[in-house]
Amino acid sequence: MPETPTPHAYGEGRPFDEHPVAGVFNVLMVGVGGQGIVLASDILTDAAVIAGLDAKKSEIHGMSQRGGSVFSHVRFASGPVYSPTIAQGEAHVIYALERMELLRWASWARPDAAAVYLAHDILPWGVSEYPAGVDEEIARIFDRVVRFETKALRQVVSPKVLNTALLGAVSVFTPLQARHYVESMDRHCPAGTAQVNQAGFEAGRELARAQLSQRGAGEQTRP
C-alpha cells in the first residue's frame, strides 16, 4: 500500500502531541565519506522512534572510506512507513555536508523543500574548483535555505560535530521536538561525546532560526 505524503506544518517549537505527523516526512541526507552522515541519520531515525513514530532508513556508504558519496534516506510517520527509500521529488528536507552533493540530489526535493547545507567543497580528482554560482543555484531551487560557512561554524562548535550542528538546523523544519534528538544523541553518540554533540545541535538550531528570521522566517518564500 503506497504512502501519500501530505503537507506538514513545520511546527518547530510547538508541543509535538498537538501537531502529529500527517503522511510520511522525508529527510534526505547527503555528503561524502567521513563527514558523519551515518551517525546523523541514526540520530534522526531514532529521534522519530522516540517520538512514537514508525521510522525507516536506508543508506549507501560503501565508498565512505575513500571519500565517495554517502547518502541516507530517513522517513517517518504516525502510521506505517512501507518503504525505506524516498521517491524522487518527495524529500521535505535535504541535509548536505557538501554543496555540490546538494545540487546532485536536488531533483529529490519537493517544490516546497528546505535545504540545510555546509558551504564546503570536497573536489573530485582533477577538479580545481567548482563553477561560479553554486550557492545562487541552490537558493533558486529550494523554497527555504539554511547555509553554513565551514570556517564560521567551526568558530562556534567543535569541528568534530559539524554533522550534528546541521542536524540542529534540520530540526527547525521537522515535526519532532528537540528533546527527541537529545535523547537519541545520548543513545548513539560515541562514549563521552554526547554533550559536545548536543551543544553542536543546539548551536545549529539557533543559527538556523536566526537565518530564517532575517529572511522573513519559516513558512515564507525564499528571499
Image (cartoon, grey):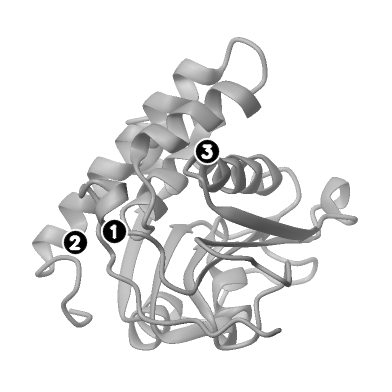
Location of residue 199 in the rendering, given as x and y in whole percent from the top left corner = 38, 25
Quadrant position of residue 22: bottom left
N-term-proximal mark, 1 vs 2: 1
What secondary structure is marked by label 2?
A: helix
Q: Sort mark 2 into few (<14), some (14-19) or many (20+) by Cα contacts within 10 Å.
A: many
What secondary structure is marked by label 3?
A: helix
N-term-proximal mark, 3 vs 1: 1
Query: Please, is residue 42 above or below residue 62 in the view?
Result: above
- As drawn, the residue found furthest toward the right would be 62
* Residue type, numbered disc 1: His
Quadrant position of residue 74: bottom right
Q: Residue 19 carries which label?
A: 1
Location of residue 156 in the rendering, given as x and y in whole percent from the top left corner = 32, 31
**Label 1 to label 2: alpha-carbon separation:** 21 Å
Location of residue 222 in the rendering, given as x and y in whole percent from the top left corner = 22, 80
Q: Sort mark 3 into few (<14), some (14-19) or many (20+) by Cα contacts within 10 Å.
A: some
* Residue type, numbered disc 2: Leu
Q: Residue 212 carries which label?
A: 2
Residue placed under numbered mark 3 in the picture: 50
Q: Which residue is drawn at 20% across and 57% down?
A: 211
Quadrant in which the N terminus appears: bottom right
Quadrant position of residue 90: bottom right
Q: Which residue is drawn at 52% across and 38% down?
A: 50
